Amino acid sequence: MQPDQRDPRPTPQVAVVVIGYNDAAHLADAVRSALDQGAAVGEVVAVDDCSTDGTAELLARLAAGEPRLRVLRRDVNSGGCGSPRNTGIDAVTMPYLMFLDSDDVLPPGAVDALLTAATGALAEVASGLCVRRELPSGREQPWQAPLYETHAVLARPSQRPRLVHDTLCVNKLYRTDFLREHGIRFPEGRFLYEDFVFTARVLAAAPRIALVPDRVYVWHVRRSAERLSLSLDRDRVENWQARTEACALVHDILLGAGQKELALAARGKFLDHEVRMYARELGLRDAGYRSAWWTHTREYLTRYDAADWERNPSAPGRLLARVIMESAEPLDLPRLRELAARPARLLPPYARTPGGTPVWSAELPQVALTPLLTRATPLLPFAVDAELRPRARDTRLCLRLHELYGRVAEAGPGEVEVRWQSREHERTAQRATATFTPCGPELWSAEVPVDLAALGAGTWDLRLTLRFADGTARNMTAHARAGAGRLRRHAVPSVRHGVLLTQPYATHSGALALRVAAGVRGVASVARGRLRRLLH
């Protein structure tokens, strides 16, 4: 018998389309991460969208030593991401393809995980976990993690409507002939949120989908970059208008394809994600932006019908949208910001009509909050105020829990667990527990000690778990109490560090967080930074 002469190496089956424009600083890392996926990658198609920063020369050097790398250069810059990706779709020769942006990377094993899932399940699409990596801190946040907790195969997308929440095109492997047979492409030119539309077109074609829990994409978020990515550049109302246009197209594409359940889920996703994200930032914008945003959102929401509102009516996004619909101009922005936070907090006052119906406020009694009377305790937008009182020997965190239309008393507030989580390293430095006790009309209070020396230098986010007598629990953040110097810096003597400089502050969503500088060097660094800001 002759020995088996078959080549043990896997057959190249995947093309990776890498797009870039004036991003020579990061492009090489992206291309190498694709080539390093191994023999399954038969070609990497790099599409240069008419760069002027040396990208073309960089790609030429890379291609000279790598036969799998093909370089395509567009004659005119498209102004967006859709056109260069379409160029890549037309050019690839492999049975499967995936997309990669020039400032991101594919983690080791990503292609193998997706290809194995797609071929094993005979799926047209395989999708895996994307992580958002904040730079330079390196902090990571999984994107749409509930979709990727376990392996799954879906005969059709409507089996899991939450798929509409994963609007990314880059954490997926597509069968090339599936895209071409259905004419699935990206919007051309400068079209923000082109991946929303592309993903909707994929779902509308009802592919068989394989989901894997593996990390298959690392999305680099560079908020300090001179040129922000399109999705991060949200300080102009045109960005919001572009996002609503994309969301409207998503709904129409899905509905036109007979995917009614997915279309309804897309409408809900707009309220639960888009409205909440932008409402959190309204307080950071000027009056002109807020007015234009409010008017445009009200006009957009007129497209919603009864079926849209009836789904999960007590969800924070639905309540936000109701307030926006019923008011002709921006109002109650601090309360809206808190309700838009994750997790949501509904701050007082808690108004009722003369008949006793819970409502948003005395000014908007038409926005009824009756769904909160039956919403499950862990999902209620309870509000807790927090104040840090730094002292040399006995720093205390003071908490106040507000009643919510009788639901707090009904559940029976008991223990609260307090955790300080490092923003840089995602670790919990210390835990403490306390018991809530009544302290006034519809208020409960608790205090816990805080060991500032044990926390040490860094930025710390406050996390709470409220436990109730009815056996339920609620994970949440706490609203930072402002005014009367509550958020000013304090220098605290420390045996371990000599001195600690503490700065309680409110995040963009209103939650209490804490910055700590340790030692003379740390304090001096803070002072120098403050001086630079004053001078500039």
Image (spheres, rainbow, N blue to C red):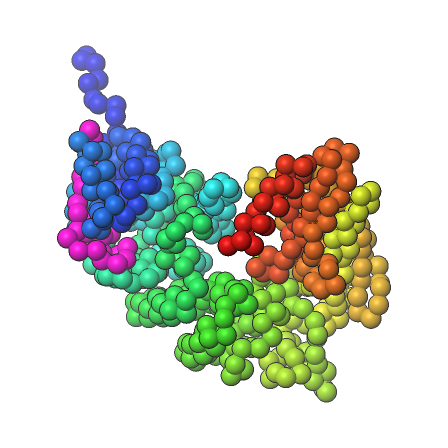
| Image coordinates for residue 504, horizontal then vertical, percent | 67, 53
Residue drawn at point x = 42 percent, y = 79 percent: 299
User: Is residue 284 visible to us here?
Assistant: yes
Give residue 444's quadrant in the image.
Answer: bottom right
Q: Is residue 130 above or below residue 166?
A: above
Q: Residue at x 74, y 66 (%)?
A: 402
Is 38 placed left or right of 413 in the picture? left
Quarter occupied by the N terminus: top left
Q: Which residues are drawn in magenta?
A: 65-88
Q: Residue 142 in the image: x percent, y percent?
A: 48, 47
| Residue 244 visible within the image | no
Is residue 79 magenta-colored? Answer: yes
- Horizontal side, residue 448 vs residue 511: left or right: right
Q: Residue at x 70, y 55 (%)?
A: 488
User: Residue 99 in magenta?
Assistant: no
- Residue extending farthest to the left is 75
For the residue pair 120 and 495, the one nearer the viewer reads as 495
Above or below, 520 against 532 in this view is above
Q: Position of residue 267 (x, y in %)?
A: 43, 69
